Amino acid sequence: MTGMEGMSANPLDLLPEILLLAGAVGGLLLGLWTPQHRQGRVRALIILAALASAVAAVIDLTAPDKAVFDDSWMIDTTTGVVRITVALATAAAVLLSSTSLAGHPRETEAYVLMVLAALGAIALAASNDLLMLAAAYLLASVPLYALAGFAKDARGVEATLKYYLMGALVGVLMLVGIAALILAAGTGNYLDLTTALPQASMPLVAIGVIGVLAGMAFKAGAVPVHFWVPDVTAGTTPAMAAFITTIPKLGAVAAAFRLVAEPFAHISLNVPLLVAVIAAASMTLGNLAAFQQTEILRLLAYSTVSQVGYMFMVVAVAGQSDYAVPALAIYLAGYAVTNLGAFAAAAALPKATAIGAWGHAVRGRPWLVLSLAVLLLGLVGTPPTAVFVGKLAIFTATAEGNLIWLMVLAAINTIASLFYYLRWIAPAARTALAGSKSQKTSPTSPTDLFQRAPAATMHATAIASVLIGIGVGLWLALIA
């Protein structure tokens, strides 16, 4: 976040976002004039736009940091990391959802909503003004309400209603927090807030900090505003659950990181301790709740809550450790790849909703179980996967930030999380190894791999998780 240039208003500064928006608008128009059975064209267009956006973001990383459009949008390393990870994760999520959405009368609209939500996640990370942050929160939220209930069944509608009501409540708290901070400092710009908040009224500042962090915690699915996560994850399709629990989290964690590192850095309130408590509660309660789950989607839901705890560890030491930005970059990339792959496992066998049923359905498919083991052990932080390197960097940054107690608690939770991941891996491995080729279910069976796109996504993300872990130096060299 150094080396910032003067303010700019060049539209090309937002080329990655413009490409995503062009993909959304172009996809919507193309869908209007495309027969229902050929909606795959829209999917291809949006994937192409997301990949082009990622390439533009990579190129933009070589430029110096700068604030654009009246200092409301920051383009720096944090924004660049989120741009790349969100664009690539969106492309993967669109591909993952292709099977479940194929033939749906609103297939085009689903893809467009996914891109708009991705734009909202990037806007959260790039916001350099509280009013821009509020707009980004809405853009990252409203499309997800529609996606959560896309199946329109009873379970999905109930989950969507809970999601919307909690989102509205936290959104109001966030707006109150933004209003309190602007009232206290007379400005919403992060740079001006950094100098004004230490001299402002502390009660107003405290209300503002709590309100704004509550908004980011909700988008990330952190405790104590995490109650929507299991219901929404289990109430929608695995592909949509993968998107909802991955893409918004990337932007929200980056936004919280920027807030703690800049406007909240010098106030008398101990904001890092508050964030550390949120991190500790998220990883611990997420793990405890996951222990009892037998339904795959609910297990993965609580797993995502636990993963937020590790992400918020690096938020707690934002600006206090030289390893904070690299740790954030590694963990966001590793989490995005690994979490999408774990949900792809559920999407590959959509009728096998419980751990036991999934293990039975995977009979004779050892490669599928191998990818599952790589992904789930990757979420634990097993070498040489990307999450392992990310956790190592986060632990180092946390230790440098003098939060030793949080690092110890995170290590304990990491070991504990192995239990519920193995509860899924072990029976599947036994069944897969015991099953012979003659014991495979029919390819037309609803529990077999007729879900080709999710299975391919699962294998690809497992490979990517290992490659990122091995080649993390290249990723760090890129963002440096």
Image (spheres, grey):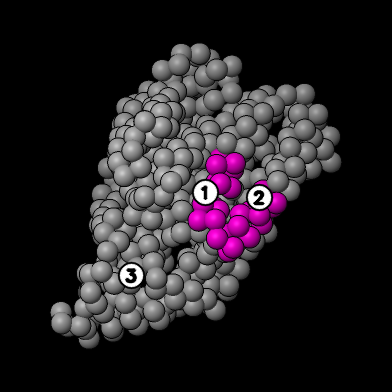
Q: Secondary structure at mark 2?
A: helix
* Mark 2–mark 3 distance (CA, rounded to whole Å): 32 Å
Q: Is residue 262 visible?
A: no
Residue type at the position of mark 2: Tyr
Could you say where residue 428 lies in the image, as x and y percent from the top left? 32, 79
Could you say where residue 386 lies in the image, as x and y percent from the top left? 34, 55
Q: Is residue 156 visible?
A: yes
User: Which span is picked out in magenta?
Assistant: 140-167
Q: Nearer the viewer, residue 368 or 438?
A: 438
Q: Which residue is mark 1?
A: 147
Residues marked 3 and 1 touching at CB (< 8 Å): no
* Mark 3–mark 1 distance (CA, rounded to whole Å): 23 Å
Q: Does residue 453 appear to the left or right of 24 in the view shown?
A: left
Would you say residue 149 sits in the magenta stretch? yes
Q: Which residue is mark 3?
A: 446
- The answer to whether residue 377 is above or below residue 292 is above
Name which residue lies at 37% across and 46% down.
94
Name which residue lies at 70% across and 43% down.
171
Q: Nearer the viewer, residue 349 or 62?
A: 349
Earlier along the polypeptide chain: callout 3 or callout 1?
A: 1
The residue at the far front in this view is: 35
Could you say where residue 264 lies in the image, as x and y percent from the top left? 67, 38
Residue 164 is tagged as 2
* Mark 1–mark 2 distance (CA, rounded to whole Å): 11 Å
Residue type at the position of mark 3: Pro
Residue type at the position of mark 1: Leu
Quadrant in the picture for the C terminus: top left
Q: Secondary structure at mark 3?
A: loop
